[in-house]
Amino acid sequence: SDIPYFAEGEVVSGFGRGSKELGIPTANFPESVIRQLPSSFECGVYYGWAKLSSYPQVFKMTMCVGWNPYYHNTVKTMETHIIHKFDSDFYGDIMKIIVLGFMRPMCDYPSLDALKKAIHNDIDVASKHLDTEESLQFKDDPFFMLVH
Ligand code: ADP
Ligand code: MG
């Protein structure tokens, strides 16, 4: 299995699909990081840990893997929602993630309301998974402590 999966890269701007307007901003990695994602990662929602270069803590996260319409669905997307309320954006930060598990297929929903409900449910489910001993052992993984 490719899980746990470790990835690291700069937070770049996405396609501004209005995630922030939904109250669920998603931090994007550059193409170089996405290209390394094994093809075994099917589209859908995952959970794991995330660390930003300008914050000391390790945060819970959910990550959506999808197809990028900009590249005619030949390139994937990895969009990470950090389960934390930030006072400002962190574009340019180096983000490190450890993906620990798959929660459900698909990132999109027909209605905005269905989407919002699904995302909030994902956050609850992810949070519970991440409170387990099995997940917590990765929260202080040396990967997060190494300075690039
Ligand atoms: P974009 O299309 O540029 O990805 P979003 O609306 O998805 O725009 O917002 C993502 C940006 O919001 C991130 O790059 C980050 O700088 C900021 N941000 C603020 N809070 C969060 C959060 N909790 N999780 C992820 N990104 C966040
Ligand atoms: Mg985004």
Image: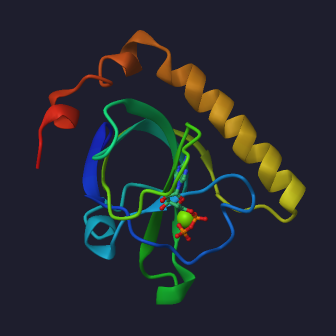
Q: Is residue 32 left or right of residue 122?
A: left
Residue at image location 22% in from the left, 35% down from the top: 144
Residue at the farthest front position: 87
Report whether 143 appears left or right of 62. Answer: left
Query: Looking at this view, is 6 or 22 the one in front?
Result: 22
Q: Is residue 136 visible?
A: yes
Please state which of residues 93 and 83 is positioned toward the viewer in this rendering: 93
Image-quadrant location for residue 84:
top right
Q: Position of residue 11 (x, y in %)?
A: 37, 62
Residue at 25% x, 72% y is: 32
- In the shown orientation, is residue 111 left or right of residue 94? right
Q: From the viewer's side, name the closer residue of 28 and 126.
A: 28
Residue 34 location (% of width, % of height): 33, 67
Q: Residue furthest top?
A: 133
Identify the residue at image location x=65%, y=58%: 107
Residue 23 lies left or right of residue 140; in this view the side is right
The residue nearer to you, when weighing 39 against 35, is 35
In this figure, which colouring scheme has been used for the structure? rainbow
The quarter of the image holding the N terminus is top left
Q: Position of residue 36 (x, y in %)?
A: 25, 64
Q: What residue do we see at 17% from left, 32% from top?
A: 145
Tell me, yes or no, if residue 100 can be seen here. Answer: no
How many tags in the picture?
0
Q: Quadrant of residue 146?
A: top left
- Indicate the quadrant of ligand 2 in the picture: bottom right
Q: On screen, 147 above or below 19?
A: above
Vertically, is 57 above or below 41? above
